[in-house]
Image: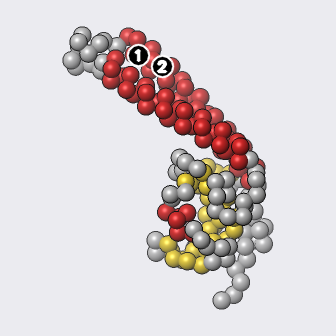
Amino acid sequence: MPHLPSLKERGSGMDKQHVVEVFLRILDSKITKTEESLVSLERQIQDAPGAMQSHSDTSKYQLGNVAQGIRERLQSMKRLRAIVQGIGTRKCRNLEHGAMFTILDLRRDHEECYFLLPEQGGDSIEVDGQEITFVSAQAPIVLAIAGRIPDDIFEFRGRRLQFVNVD
């Protein structure tokens, strides 16, 4: 099989520090919006009828449960922010939290970039025209490449992929 050039050999490497900075800006925006939603909801809770006052309107108790869920989500986002900020640009040799890795779809000749987080994967952002998907260790693509080394070729969900690199 001929040697397929790696991402760095092809000259399209992604600056990990820049990816982290963009992700943190987006996460900060989400945190701010969530905090604003929580403040607004807490105002609604103050004005809401108690459970004994109304049987058809949303009660203080129900709104309180919603607020608690928002508080938990907010704590989780802040925890993730601290973790990602702490990861910084440390170099990763293996798939570990903070690793940025690239997969090449061999049939479409299309690169897919991922950033491995300790929790809360699923978001994608665009950085300099390249989509970066943030995944957790339980994501199917991470499980599919666990134990592989760069340049390994494998099948995943009917696609022929190459594990290009990890940074």
Q: Is the residue 61 above or below the residue 142 in the image?
A: above
Residue at 71% in and 43% down: 86
Q: Residues within 10 Å of mark 2 (few under 14, many from 20)?
A: few
Determine whether the residue tagged by mark 2 lies in a helix, strand or loop. Answer: helix
Residue type indicated by callout 1: Gln
Residue at 65% in and 43% down: 83
| Quadrant assignment for the N terminus | bottom right
Q: Is residue 113 left or right of residue 158?
A: right
Residue at 70% in and 42% down: 85
Residue 143, given in percent of the width and then of the height, sits at: 52, 65
Q: Which residue is under mark 2?
A: 40
Q: Is residue 90 left or right of residue 102?
A: right
Name the outermost residue toward the bottom.
1
> Disc 1, disc 2: CB below 8 Å?
yes
Determine whether the residue tagged by mark 1 lies in a helix, strand or loop. Answer: helix
Residue 141 circle label = none
Q: Is the residue 51 above or below the residue 117 in the image?
A: above
Towards the viewer: 161 or 129: 161
As measured in the structure, the alpha-carbon distance from the residue carrying label 1 to the one carrying label 2 is: 6 Å
Residue 6, given in percent of the width and then of the height, sits at: 72, 73
Residue 88, given in percent of the width and then of the height, sits at: 74, 47
Q: Which residue is under mark 1?
A: 44
- The image's colouring method is secondary structure
The quarter of the displayed image where residue 84 is located: top right
Please say whether residue 109 is visible from this viewpoint: no
Q: Is residue 167 left or right of residue 148?
A: right
The quarter of the displayed image where residue 136 is located: bottom right
Residue type indicated by callout 2: Ser
The quarter of the displayed image where residue 62 is located: top left
Q: Is the residue 73 above or below the residue 46 in the image?
A: below
